[in-house]
Amino acid sequence: MKLILKTLIIFCILTQSYGQDDFQSLLDQQFEMSRRLMQEALKSQRDFLNDPAVIGALKKAGVGDPFAIELEHSYRMEKDNIVLVVKVGDPKNSNLKIIVENGLIKVKGEVTKKLEKSGPNGSSSSMITRSVSHQYPVPDNVDENKHKIKIVGKNIEIIFPKKKNKKTI
């Protein structure tokens, strides 16, 4: 948290030092840095929660759901778009509803996950279906009403066109 605050303070100082033309570039850089920091924090948390010892301890204590399905996500910056990429495993066999409204991207429905386990006595696999409900913020400076949704491999991509900046002469 302190790192984010320090980054924001530096960002404010830099925006006062640069002109209007460089402001959008600085915003894009700040967005990318914040996205990377958030991904690192989420990966660390996910690694901890996926540790077999932690799962076993949670299961013994009766806390949490070791078979919970989390939808991994990331934002990707493109020249004219900002894309939310949600990893769902098999989007064609998942029953998901995506709604964009009031500054939020809501992903609700059912996701099927294949679990495979190998041990000294052989291996087994099973399929579980879980209900999911996740919300993600709509990125700033995009037109949320003109979004497009695509399935790309194991991902669902929600594409938001960036708002065009009007320059005055």
Image (cartoon, rainbow, N blue to C red):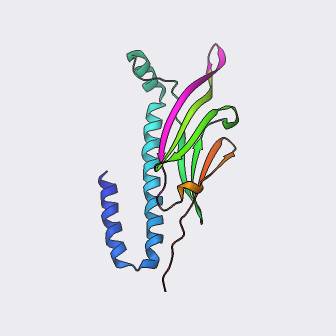
Was residue 121 drawn as part of the magenta stretch in this picture? Answer: yes
The residue positioned farthest toward the bottom in the image shown: 169
Q: Position of residue 122 (x, y in %)?
A: 66, 15
Left or right, 155 with reference to 132: right
Q: Is residue 24 above or below residue 58?
A: below
Q: Position of residue 166 (x, y in %)?
A: 51, 75
The residue positioned farthest toward the top in the image shown: 121
Q: Is residue 18 above or below residue 150?
A: below
Task: Determine the residue positioned at 43% across, 26% down.
Answer: 54
Left or right, 13 with reference to 122: left
Counting every numbered tag in the picture gives 0
Q: Nearer the viewer, residue 125 or 154?
A: 154
Q: Position of residue 167 (x, y in %)?
A: 50, 79
Q: Position of residue 41 (x, y in %)?
A: 42, 45
Q: Which residues are magenta?
A: 118-140
Q: Nearer the viewer, residue 124 or 150?
A: 150
Q: Main secondary structure of the magenta part?
A: strand
Task: Determine the residue positioned at 54% across, 59% down.
Answer: 143
Q: Is residue 48 above or below residue 159?
A: above
Left or right, 55 with reference to 113: left
